Amino acid sequence: MSITASMVSELRKKTGAGMMDCKKALAETGGNMDDAVDFLRKKGLSAAAKKSGRIAAEGVVVAAAEGARGVLVEVNAETDFVAKNADFQKFVQGIATLCLSSEVVDIEELKTLAFPGTGRTVAEELSHQIATIGENMSLRRFDRCNAGVGCVVSYIHGAGKIGVLVELKTSSTDPRVEALARQFAMHVAAANPQYLKREQVPLEIVDKEKEIMRVKALDSGKPENIVDKIIVGQINKYFGEVCLLEQDFVIDPDHKINKIVEKLSKELGVAIELSRFVRYQLGEGIEKKEDDFAAEVAALSK
């Protein structure tokens, strides 16, 4: 199969590996993108797991939370200049408040709601903002938490570059519960967990990680009879990196998040469950045009 410049470019964006390494990986795997990613990871040449979804777009992430409920909203714009516009920020915050007070389940349903104080629907107000500010915008996504009994706390970092919701279920109204939830939200912003607990990690992902660990261990000269023991330790370390409850608490690195929850639960004499979190990073998964880089790859492939 012919390896094109666009394929090399796509693989480099996914993995952060060098262009020649990407070209070789695609050649070795017959142009299969997923296999090429795994090939690079097995060779220790890829940072795919950590770089996934970091390509940014402009706009803002905002939150609205009250009691045991909260929402997170992302609206994109073309430039950072518009993201800092007071009218744009007011519009996005209005969307978050509207989401919090409604039970809409998706963007299309949200667009049909009346936008407060305008006589227009959300979709119409979005079009009005585009016409007024003079830049294309997109109401991209929203998510919500509802603890039922407990609290939901939001945290916005970097003027809307990262937004987090954290949900704690408990019957306690002690202010330490909300304070801890806020610390957890800051932790999620910094540590970027992918899952709440290891049981939520899809089996195919776990199996793929184990396969990569096995290949790397064998390639490094480890005896095959101890590789399984090595993998047990490494997969537990992997869970500690991607699962919130097993991560080291950034404020108290000597203790994992689940132990911090248990500690406060014992102090208050009531059950506390860290039941859900939502983390948005502005523009994750949205690719920007990179003309200079594309030209560089095209030149290399000739």
Image (spheres, helix red, strand yellow):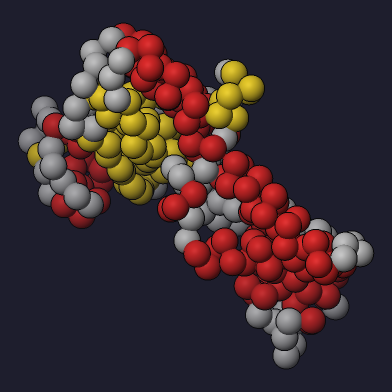
Instruction: Give the residue at x 73% y 57%.
Output: 229
Q: Position of residue 179 (x, y in %)?
A: 39, 13
Residue 206 location, quadrant = bottom right
- Residue closest to the far right: 221
Q: How many marks?
A: 0
Res. 196 visible in picture:
yes
- Residue closest to the far front: 225
Q: Where is residue 244 in the image (x, y as percent from the top left)?
A: 50, 38
Using the image as rendered, state which of residue 232 and residue 244 is in the foreground: 232
Q: Where is residue 98 in the image (x, y as percent from the top left)?
A: 18, 33
Q: Quadrant of the C terminus?
A: bottom right
Instruction: Give the residue at x 66% y 45%.
Output: 237
Residue 151 location, quadrant = top left
Res. 62 visible in picture:
no
Query: Would you place residue 145 above or below residue 139 in this image?
Result: above
Using the image as rendered, state which of residue 210 and residue 66 is in the foreground: 210
Q: Is residue 198 left or right of residue 133?
A: right
Q: Is residue 214 left or right of residue 177?
A: right
Instruction: Give the residue at x 73% y 81%.
Output: 29
Q: Position of residue 70 (x, y in %)?
A: 26, 30
Q: Is residue 234 left or right of residue 118?
A: right
Q: In which quarter of the image is the N terminus?
A: bottom right
Query: Would you place residue 23 above or below residue 96 in this image?
Result: below
